[in-house]
Image (cartoon, rainbow, N blue to C red):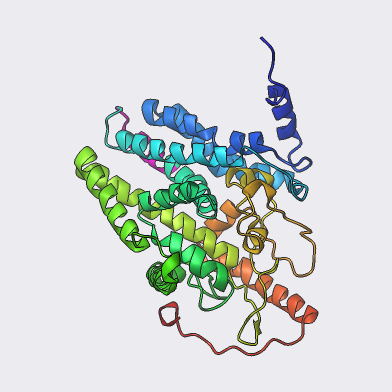
């Protein structure tokens, strides 16, 4: 039997792991860090503690520690590099999301014989994966031009009772990021908890208005919000019928946990960053309008989501091609720790503001020195008024 010359040998993959931060990661590296946890989580849901604690320790301690020890980001892919299997990994992760969701509900309702502590561990471990990896997968898919891929990402969000994010993210957040009209851009001094209380309803309304404003020939045959609401209700009823009230309660908590993680990422990645007003509009989105994080391990885990400024500059660019660029450039917004770590820090407003507010002000000063004075902008009282 001949060996496939295209298949990466195990020693080569291990060599890439040993040199994270020195080589451009291929799809096998994204697969290793984002998909390999899936079978570990599945085994944890079936057999309990050992696998669950491995997964939790890796996600909570292992990844942040490796990011901190390595420090150096992986190099950017060459311009125009072709990652032929990039969408295959997204499809695989999407299928894994739905399988893991079902398996978690089987576990937390006691069907696999797990004890109470093990069920809580399964919920936390699978919930972290779903919030961070499934969320990143859905985000990538809704930016794909292929309608089938788009709908796959849409249904991941719907399964988390968060279908509105599909419309609000594409039609509101991207064109209006860094302005007070974007519900998902947190303003300087705003805590995550204040942000969380406002962003969900404001995002719902903004996405609805954006869908209604689309030209008639650009609207889907079935209104988007009808799909979100009917699909979400369908998941609720199906889970209630199959798993009972305990399963439904666990599912609703999981959706809350996943949505909270997705919103934490939005909060962290745009906190305090503003685009200057230019005439009737705003300056183009650039590297100073999203907080990036160089950590190589969390980038592989979250499909390069920490390279967020390049995503806003090139929304259709596939995740392996997202560039970090020069992190030392004067106008760059670079987080002090990896994106998952900063999301945890954001849960403590006092610690968050002590760490980030001075960075926002320093960045604004550097940007102001590099640009002529911006036109003044009238304040917006709240997201509900935007």
Residue 6 visible somewhere in the drawing: yes
- The location of residue 56, given as percent across then percent down, is 49, 38
- The location of residue 306, given as percent across then percent down, is 63, 54
Q: Quick one: quadrant of the C terminus? A: bottom left
- The location of residue 237, given as percent across then percent down, is 22, 48
Q: Residue at x 33, y 59 (%)?
A: 222
- Using the image as rendered, state which of residue 125 and residue 290 is in the foreground: 290
- The location of residue 39, given as percent across then percent down, is 48, 29
Q: Is residue 297 left or right of residue 156?
A: right
Q: Is residue 52 left or right of residue 145?
A: left
- Using the image as rendered, state which of residue 187 and residue 168 is in the foreground: 168
Q: Quick one: quadrant of the N terminus? A: top right
Pick out the residue farthest to the front: 217
Q: Relative to residue 267, is residue 233 depicted above or below? A: above
The quadrant holding residue 163 is: bottom left
Q: Relative to residue 13, is residue 170 depicted above or below? A: below
- Main secondary structure found in the magenta portion: helix
In the image, which residues are magenta? 113-124
């Amino acid at each position: 039997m001949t060996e496939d010359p295209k298949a990466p040998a195990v020693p080569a993959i291990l060599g890439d792991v040993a040199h994270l931060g020195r080589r451009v990661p291929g799809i096998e590296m994204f697969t290793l860090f984002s998909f390999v946890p899936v079978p570990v989580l599945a085994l944890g849901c079936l057999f309990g503690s050992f696998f669950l604690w491995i997964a939790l320790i890796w996600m909570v301690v292992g990844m942040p520690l490796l990011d901190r020890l390595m420090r150096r980001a992986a190099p950017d892919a060459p311009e125009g590099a072709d990652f032929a299997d990039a969408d295959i990994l997204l499809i695989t992760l999407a299928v894994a999301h739905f399988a893991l969701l079902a398996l978690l509900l089987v576990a937390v309702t006691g069907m696999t014989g797990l004890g109470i502590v093990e069920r809580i561990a399964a919920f936390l471990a699978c919930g972290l994966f779903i919030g961070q990896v499934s969320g990143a997968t859905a985000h990538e898919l809704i930016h794909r031009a292929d309608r089938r891929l788009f709908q796959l990402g849409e249904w991941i969000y719907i399964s988390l009772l968060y279908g509105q994010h599909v419309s609000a993210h594409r039609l509101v957040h991207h064109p209006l990021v860094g302005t007070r009209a974007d519900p998902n851009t947190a303003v300087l001094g705003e805590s995550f908890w204040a942000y969380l209380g406002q962003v969900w309803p404001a995002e719902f309304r903004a996405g609805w208005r954006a869908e209604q404003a689309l030209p008639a020939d650009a609207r889907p045959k079935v209104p988007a919000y009808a799909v979100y609401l009917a699909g979400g209700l369908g998941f609720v009823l199906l889970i209630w019928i199959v798993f009972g009230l305990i399963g439904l309660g666990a599912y609703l908590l999981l959706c809350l946990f996943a949505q909270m993680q997705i919103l934490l990422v939005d909060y962290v990645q745009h906190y305090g960053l503003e685009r200057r007003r230019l005439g009737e509009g705003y300056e183009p989105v650039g590297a100073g309008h999203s907080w990036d994080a160089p950590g190589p391990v969390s980038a592989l885990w979250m499909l390069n989501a920490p390279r967020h400024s390049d995503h806003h500059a090139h929304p259709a660019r596939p995740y392996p091609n997202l560039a970090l660029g020069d992190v030392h450039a004067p106008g760059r917004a670079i987080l002090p720790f990896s994106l998952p770590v900063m999301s945890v820090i954001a849960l403590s407003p006092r610690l968050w503001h002590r760490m980030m507010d001075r960075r926002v002000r320093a960045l604004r000063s550097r940007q102001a020195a590099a640009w002529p004075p911006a036109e003044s902008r009238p304040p917006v009282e709240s997201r509900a008024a935007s």
